[in-house]
């Protein structure tokens, strides 16, 4: 039995196999429409979510399976004090696989230690968000035709952004990757990722504050929102939330072949006027997320479709 707690749980070769499966699902959805008949997915979301929860549920329904679960801590027995360990023991009696989102780092790790079904980490605090990373990798590969030899700009909340942290961990395993880290001083990438991941792997990167200084050299721009729920006080959030706004004027500085990604939800960091730009790929990114989660469910349940 396998779990997905980190994007590093799959080797590069296994990632290629998973992404190939997701691409086949995209091309031939009817072939997989009954692959998970009789199987149940439990979504255990201790933290609010739209895309991640519904994407997992859509993935299982597209495979012919069924879904159950809860959408907030308040609607579960966690509000009565039940531990994650006890919850997963109970859920293991009902479902065949589960996806868990939790505000505390390491909660999915605790779950997998007590689970008799595969556990998918759907985001734990500011730590990891591996299924979003799989989505990002599929999106980049589909748009650019490769996952190597490119310059990736990461913009916004690099301190608390778990999507950014997971994506860096995954991309450093591909040759020729270079990062431009675009953030205000207060939201810089944490030292442990800068030193333990980038420096230890000899990955070239530079840090800039102005988005305009980075745009001309990018192959991919990965925008993130400033996350209100990660701040300890309202004043700091208000001061930082509109630090970056990508609009048509800034897009004019970017290469014609640069694509814009965003894990969503967005607030103000991408102007609505950018949505019509052919380089705006964040809604296509959402669709790729369903395909890649379908592939992940099949892989963790060890279901093969000829």
Image (cartoon, grey):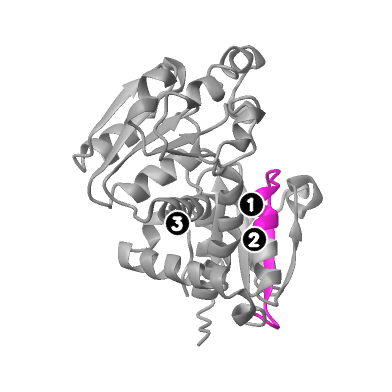
Tell me how far mark 1 sits from mark 2, CA to CA: 6 Å
Instruction: Tell me which corner region of the image, top left, top right, bottom left or bottom right, holds residue 200.
Output: top left
Which residue: 46% across, 70% down? 2
Residue of label 1 = 52
Do residues under tags 1 and 3 come within 8 Å of each other at their CB atoms?
no
Which residue: 45% across, 56% down? 142
Q: Is residue 141 magenta?
A: no
Q: Nearer the viewer, residue 205 or 279?
A: 279
Query: In the structure shown, which secondary structural element does the residue marked by tag 3 occupy?
Result: helix
Query: In the structure shown, which secondary structural element does the residue marked by tag 2 occupy?
Result: helix
Residue of label 2 = 56
Instruction: Tell me which corner region of the image, top left, top right, bottom left or bottom right, holds residue 33.
Output: bottom right
Residue of label 3 = 142
Do residues under tags 1 and 2 come within 8 Å of each other at their CB atoms?
yes
Do residues under tags 3 and 2 come within 8 Å of each other at their CB atoms?
no
Query: In the structure shown, which secondary structural element does the residue marked by tag 1 occupy?
Result: helix
Q: Nearer the viewer, mark 3 or mark 2?
A: 3
Question: Which residue range is magenta in the image?
Answer: 36-55
């Amino acid at each position: 039995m396998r779990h997905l707690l980190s994007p590093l749980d799959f080797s590069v070769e296994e990632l290629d196999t998973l992404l190939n499966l997701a691409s086949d699902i995209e091309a031939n959805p009817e072939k997989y429409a009954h692959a998970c008949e009789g199987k149940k997915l439990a979504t255990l979301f201790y933290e609010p979510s739209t895309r991640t929860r519904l994407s997992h549920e859509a993935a299982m329904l597209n495979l012919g399976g069924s879904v159950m679960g809860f959408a907030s801590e308040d609607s579960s027995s966690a509000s009565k004090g039940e531990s994650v360990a006890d919850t997963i023991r109970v859920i293991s009696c009902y479902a065949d696989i589960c996806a868990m989102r939790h505000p505390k780092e390491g909660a999915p790790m605790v779950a997998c230690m007590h689970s008799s079904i595969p556990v998918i980490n759907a985001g734990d605090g500011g730590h990891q968000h591996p299924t979003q990373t799989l989505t990002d990798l599929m999106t980049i590969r589909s748009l650019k035709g490769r996952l190597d030899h490119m310059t990736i700009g990461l913009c916004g909340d690099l301190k608390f952004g778990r999507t950014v942290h997971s994506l860096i961990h995954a991309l450093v395993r591909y040759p020729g990757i270079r990062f431009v880290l675009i953030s205000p001083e207060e939201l810089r990438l944490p030292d442990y990722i800068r030193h333990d991941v980038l420096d230890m792997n000899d990955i070239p990167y530079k840090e800039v504050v102005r988005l305009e200084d980075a745009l001309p050299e990018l192959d991919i721009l990965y925008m993130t929102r400033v996350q209100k729920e990660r701040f300890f006080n309202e004043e700091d959030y208000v001061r930082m939330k509109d630090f970056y706004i990508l609009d048509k004027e800034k897009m004019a500085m970017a290469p014609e072949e640069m694509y814009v990604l965003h894990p969503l939800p967005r607030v103000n960091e991408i102007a609505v006027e950018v949505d019509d730009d052919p380089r705006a790929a964040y809604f296509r990114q959402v669709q790729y997320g369903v395909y890649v989660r379908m592939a992940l469910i099949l892989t963790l349940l060890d279901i093969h479709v000829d």
